Amino acid sequence: MSASYQVTDGVAVITLTNPPVNGLGHSTRAGIVDGVNLANADASVKAIVITGGGKVFCGGADIREFNTPAAFAAPGLHLTIETIEKSSKPVVAAIHGVVMGGGLELALGCHYRVMAPGVQVALPEVNIGLIPGGGGTQRLPRVLPVEQTLQMVTTGASVTSDKLAKVPGQQLIAKLIEGDLVAGAVAFAKEVADVRPMPLVRHLPVSPVSDPELFNKARADMAKARRGLISPQRCVDAIEIAANTPDIDVGIQKELDIFKEIMVGPQAKAMQHAFFGERAASKIPDVPESTPARKIEKVAVIGAGTMGGGITMCFLNAGIPVTLLEMKQEAIDRGVGTIRKNYEAQVAKGKLAQDKYEQRMSLLTTTLSYDDIAQADMVIEAVFEDFGVKSQVFTKLDAVMKPGAILASNTSTLDVDKIAEVTKRPADVVGLHFFSPANVMRLLEVVRSKHTAKDVMATVMQVAKKIKKVAVVSGVCDGFIGNRMFEQYVRQSFFLVEEGATVQQVDKAAEAFGFAMGPFRVGDLAGNDIGFAIRKRRKIEQPDVIYSPVGDAVCELGRFGQKVGKGWYDYEAGKREPVPSAEVQACVDKVRADKGLTPRAISDDEIVQRLVLALVNEGAAILEEGIASKASDIDMVYLTGYGFPLTWGGPMLYADLLGLPKVVELMKGFAGNPHGDPAFWTPAPLLAKLAAEGKTFN
Ligand code: NAI
């Protein structure tokens, strides 16, 4: 039983004991029900307190039980809450730390709730593709204003007990208790022991709604802020039901119906996959969590350009001092100027307090001398993408850095094994591939060279967490996980245009699927010259890789993207709105004419499938080669670094949901198309094997 029972001075105290967050697993639910029944049967007990052992009251469902029979075994959450509501003696929830999801729903079933200050209160189900299914959408708007309930339920964001206690008319928190919570709750329980009738949230009316358009507006806001996601919409529906349904039992049944309906849908699967995938990414199969990490208290960054500046901000934001090293004072001034400008923009928008900005800047020092960074615990190099330049930097670092310092490179294409071999301490070298803008993008590819020590891996994974990145480990290969797959995606986008689609059609189809931006808009934003240079290099290094000439033809016109005012699209001066370009279309027409190719109509479905399955086939190869250790890591790279739609949970989960035999069949169809690169569509051996065995990637 994951709940203990003790009677003190006429009050039964039920303590949830299911670490780490007292999740409402089967044995916890059973413990609560047994405790309440025991207390009701004991004449010496006058009232009941439910509290959480350890640091929190209750974090909600026990995620370890997800998709197992235990999650549904009796007593379920509804029955547990019903047992509390039917108790003949008052039940007081004594809440500290965290009360989330099912934990909050449980508390809403209690007669009273007392809370410590600073408790995080939330219903986060929306973020795993669900709605609260234990009465949360029906009871919360009876104790808080409907507007506040909508905000909490549709975003899943937590609000502190101190804030909620101040909401006018709120009936969520009976009392804030400073100091010993359980003692305070027991004293409170004694005070209310004889109050009859006992108050229940279910007996309260839903708070009045003044704006008749409130729910429609909330749905429209959610459609914009959380594009394509069903769960925020259904959260609004459920709260609207509460507002329009005086009989709470009818409302609770309708909530449960919605919960059951969306629980089995692909979106809930995709969002839960992303939720668990993020947690799984931090685990490295051969690096136990007990591996001692090195202390990282001071960091140095080499290069104050686009990436160096963003990386510096990540550490300053986390309160870690940074020394930024450059070759010339002008470069430092430019880099620091950009950092200041970024922070000032945040201050102007009210997203950062002035004193926090100053505090962060006070953690930054700059230098032109390697002697000043020698004592840093970790140094991250972000200089020009040139092996010669990088090897000079690493030779210097090797000479000056204190023993045990971690030497990291932000290279996006170079061989991290070779960079490590420049030094006499290759075990201390690792790749930390940030994405641009580094202070915004959540993804961090941690590139593990064949030399990297395990404790270095353990350390950088911890550091990543501190600077709020989703770290995914990649082996060494050209492009690592993300860019190696992206290359195939971009190659397909060029073939599609060459064969008959327009640039706009490809982007629109990709965006309708849910990508944040289509491939050509991404190219214009990032700079088409980067891919142009890579293709030039590849023509020498890997002459058998086939490209449609359209990409090079557009770059030869100097159409490098937004930074020069023209790329795959035209841009009016100072604007970012893409305008279809006659020059690009003429360029595409010429490529087709040179090849003697008659353009054909290409469906949006074909566009999406060729783009996404190109990612999948390369992803399968990456998995097979061990560059990624699990399919969910690949999905996390795409969800957090490449704007892949969360609705599908990443390319590998998309393939799983489509069914791998269907994926193989589609690829066979694409291989029958003589244009482009038919050979690419031979399913990677791992994909073919899993499809034949009826298995999935995830
Ligand atoms: P950048 O050209 O904006 O900045 C490079 C900076 O390094 C310049 O300020 C330059 O003065 C400085 N620098 C060059 N040699 C140096 C040396 N020997 N010592 C000290 N400073 C030196 O380049 P960016 O875009 O910041 O790229 C830096 C690295 O990050 C490259 O390896 C690149 O491949 C990688 N990267 C770039 C991404 C991007 O989107 N720009 C994304 C991910 C990685």
Image (cartoon, rainbow, N blue to C red):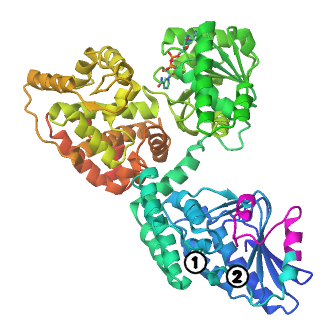
Instruction: Write the residue at 70% across / 66% down.
Output: 168
Task: In the displayed orientation, state which residue is furthest to the front.
Answer: 210
Indicate left or right for 564 with 111 as reference: left
User: 463 left or right of 261?
Assistant: right
Kind of residue indicated by mark 1: Ala
Magenta stretch?
162-187
Q: Could you tell me which residue is drawn at 24 percent across and 30 percent down?
A: 494
Tell me, yes or no, whether the two marked residues, 2 and 1, touch with CB atoms within 8 Å: no
**In the visual, does 195 lie left or right of 34?**
right
Of 109 and 278, nearer the camera is 109
Q: Position of residue 72 (x, y in %)?
A: 55, 75
Secondary structure, mark 2, is helix
Q: Which label lies toward us, 2 or 1? A: 2
Name the mark on residue 406.
none
Check disc 1 and report its element: helix, strand or loop: loop
In the picture, the quarter occupied by the N terminus is: bottom right
Q: Residues within 10 Å of mark 1 (few under 14, many from 20)?
A: some
Q: Position of residue 697 (x, y in %)?
A: 41, 50
Inspect this view and state whether residue 523 appears.
yes
Q: Residue furthest right?
A: 9
Q: Tell whether position 169 is magenta.
A: yes
Give residue 67's position: percent from left, percent from top.
51, 66
Amino acid type at image mark 2: Val
Q: Nearer the viewer, residue 405 or 467?
A: 467
Q: Residue at x 73, y 80 (%)?
A: 111
In primary-sequence order, the first of circles 2 and 1 is 2
Q: In this figure, which residue is indicated by the disc labeled 1?
A: 73
Query: Which residue does the numbered mark 2 point to in the structure image?
Result: 33
Based on the displayed image, in which of its 4 quarters is residue 134 positioned? bottom right
Does the numbered disc 2 mark a residue whose Cβ is under 8 Å from ligand 1? no
